Image (cartoon, rainbow, N blue to C red):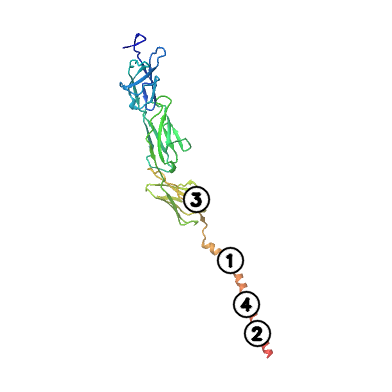
Amino acid sequence: MSFIHAGLTQERPKPVLKVTPDQRVFRGETVTLTCDIQRAGDIRWRYSWFKHGNTFYPYPTTTAEFSFTAYVSNSGEYSCRGERSDSQRSDISAAVTLTVSDLPRSTLTVTPDRPVFTGETVNLKCVIESDHSDWRYEWYKDSVMLQTSDRYTVNRDTLTIRGATESDQGQYWCRGHRDERPKSSRSSSAVSLSVKDSPTSTLTVTPDSPVFTGETVNLTCVLESHSDWRYEWYKDSVMLQTSDRYTVNRDTLTIRGATESDQGQYWCRGQRDERPQSSQDSNRINLSVNGQISVFSILSFLLAACPYLLSTVVLLFKCCRARVTSTEDHSQFAVTEEQTSS
């Protein structure tokens, strides 16, 4: 093949097509095709681009470079050709195969299974299907990237939420980044995290507080769900241990022979092997213990009070008798005076 220029017969130039960054790229990367033609003088070329021998871009470009964002559908054989201002053309370059691979897949898993309960620890793991291990992980909740804190900690591919609350509910997803190609993974599918309140526990006391020394006190921990609970009992934030005086029968703590040392703030909580593994803490109840009023104490009080009572009765008797005597004298005097006047 040849074309005539300035009376001379010349071979058509053969362009060389180059691909940047590589002939194997990943979805989302920018691919640049460069059509390199050995030029003579100040000849200006326009460039046409082909995929599988068909025009890839409808209009010739005035620059030797053509860039586009790669998608898997862009995979194929590419070539180029130059055209001079005098309508003479170069040969078509040898075809170069471009392979566009999808980004590594990210999958988000959540432990424990949803829903989670308030107070539980939740682990979200970002699994990236890749031969590479140098990923940096990004974590998102409702499209906002999460920052590490006392409750949100990251250990490589795992985000841990400690002490889950209802505010942790939302849509979570993850993505990986690295310095080399591929520089990013695909974003994982969003996982919806729901947080439910742990079962409620209620503490009741029989008899009602205050109780008296020597009495038997029953504290019952009522839980609204499940039946396989183990009960924990606390007094002033210290967990109680069973003893001769403190006995436990399923949901009831019994205090035998109450003393003033048993006074304090009591509460309970349930534990079990399955989820939910813990209940909420119960309400706090203040138990007060009063000294017992015995019959002997009552008799002692009465005996001690008798002299004072006797003195009071005598004084009242004397006052009443004096008043009666005074009234009788006054009446007798009135009668005598009336007889004298007559």
Q: CA distance from mark 2 to mark 4?
A: 17 Å
Q: CA distance from mark 4 to mark 1?
A: 25 Å
Q: In this orientation, which residue lies closer to the viewer: 188 or 296?
A: 188
The amino acid marked with disc number 2 is Gln
Q: CA distance from mark 4 to mark 3?
A: 60 Å
Please state, as top left, top right, bottom left or bottom right, where the C terminus lies in the image: bottom right
The residue depicted at 51 percent of the width and 63 percent of the height is 295
**Location of mark 1 (residue):** 305
Q: Are marks 2 and 3 in contact (CB under 8 Å)?
A: no
**Location of mark 2 (residue):** 332
Please state, as top left, top right, bottom left or bottom right, where the N terminus lies in the image: top left
**Location of mark 3 (residue):** 265
Which circle's residue, 2 or 1, is located before the other in the chain? 1
Q: CA distance from mark 2 to mark 1?
A: 41 Å
Q: Which-is-in-front pick, marks 2 and 4?
A: 2
Q: Are marks 1 and 3 in contact (CB under 8 Å)?
A: no
Q: Secondary structure at mark 2?
A: helix
Q: Are marks 4 and 3 in contact (CB under 8 Å)?
A: no
Outermost residue on the right side: it is 340
Which circle's residue, 4 or 1, is located before the other in the chain? 1
The amino acid marked with disc number 3 is Gln
| Structural crowding at the residue carrying mark 3, measured as other residues with C-alpha within 10 Å and reported as few (<14), some (14–19) or many (≥20) | some
Q: Which-is-in-front pick, marks 4 and 1?
A: 4
Measured as percent of width and height from the top left, residue 82 is found at: 36, 17
Which circle's residue, 4 or 3, is located before the other in the chain? 3
Which circle's residue, 2 or 4, is located before the other in the chain? 4
Which circle's residue, 2 or 3, is located before the other in the chain? 3
Q: Which mark is residue 321?
A: 4
Measured as percent of width and height from the top left, residue 155 is found at: 44, 32
